[in-house]
Image (cartoon, rainbow, N blue to C red):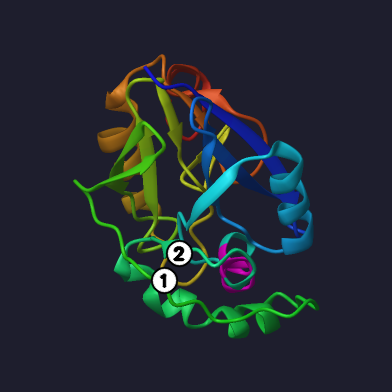
Amino acid sequence: MAELQVAIVPVTDFQQNCAIIWDTDTRQAAVFDPGGNVDRIASKIRQLKVTVEKIILTHGHIDHAGGAMDLKDALDIPIIGPHKDDELLLLGLEDQAQMFNVQSPVRNCIPDEWLDEGETISIGGNEFAIFHCPGHAPGHVVFYNEENSFAHVGDCLFKGGIGRTDLPGGNHDALISSIKNKLLPLGDDIMFICGHGPDSTFGEERQNNPFLV
């Protein structure tokens, strides 16, 4: 079984968890959700001595996708995801910057490939199943690697919390359904990283998360 390692790079004033995930055998890597501070992300990539082959987006909010086009240009690699239902969000990143008073330059994003439920992506020898989990954003996707009992859930689920649903395209009932019907059934032992804050397990959140109990 190929093993995964993760390095978290907090970016932007939103302290979003940009994640660099790589295969320990091949050192092939992907950058998840480069929301900004691209120079900081690039510096971490050099420090880790990994080969980044793709940028992966969980959804189209500015703190997750605001730096994607700049990183794409810097590394000459494709942007993969999220689901096409987030196209309007990604084409409106510059408008989001004005809405949230983001001062650093932000560019609208056009992914090279959309993702849909049932598809897979690979990082080195590690295959991730794709789950379309709307609620926080219409096109939000989650990535699950069965072999390592690991998931990247973006802003669907947090330790002790869930993603906000008061932004355009948000839907509280859809988010709870995504979590309860798609994520929690994967198993209590699944460790996940998320878009903000510390990691957790599905079992811990099933038992203790006030939004799910």
Can residue 187 be seen by looking at this rendering? Answer: yes
Per the image, is 14 magenta? no
Decide if residue 15 is in sight here.
Answer: no
Write the residue at 25% across / 35% down.
181
Mark 2 element type? strand
Residue 186 falls left or right of residue 6: left
- Residue 182: percent from left, percent from top: 27, 36
* C-alpha distance separating marks 1 and 2: 5 Å
N-term-proximal mark, 1 vs 2 = 2
Q: Look at the image and give the residue range highlighted in magenta.
A: 65-72
Secondary structure of the residue carrying numbered label 1:
loop
Q: Is residue 116 found left or right of 1 in the rendered image?
A: left
Along the viewing direction, whichever of 12 and 125 lies nearer the viewer: 125
At which x and y percent is residue 122? 35, 41
**Mark 1 and 2 residues: CB-CB less than 8 Å, in contact?**
yes
Q: Magenta: predominant secondary structure element?
A: helix
Q: Position of residue 82 (x, y in %)?
A: 38, 60
Q: Note whether 131 is above or below 26 in the view shown.
A: below
Identify the residue position indicated by label 2 in the image: 79
Residue 29, numbered circle = none
Q: Residues within 10 Å of mark 2 (few under 14, many from 20)?
A: many
For residue 111, above or below residue 208: below
Q: Nearer the viewer, residue 194 or 33?
A: 33
What kind of residue is marked 2? Ile
Q: Amino acid at mark 1?
A: Pro
Q: Which mark is residue 111?
A: 1
The residue at the point 57 percent across, 28 percent down is 5
Q: Quadrant of the C terminus?
A: top left
Image position, residue 7 (x, y; %): 66, 35
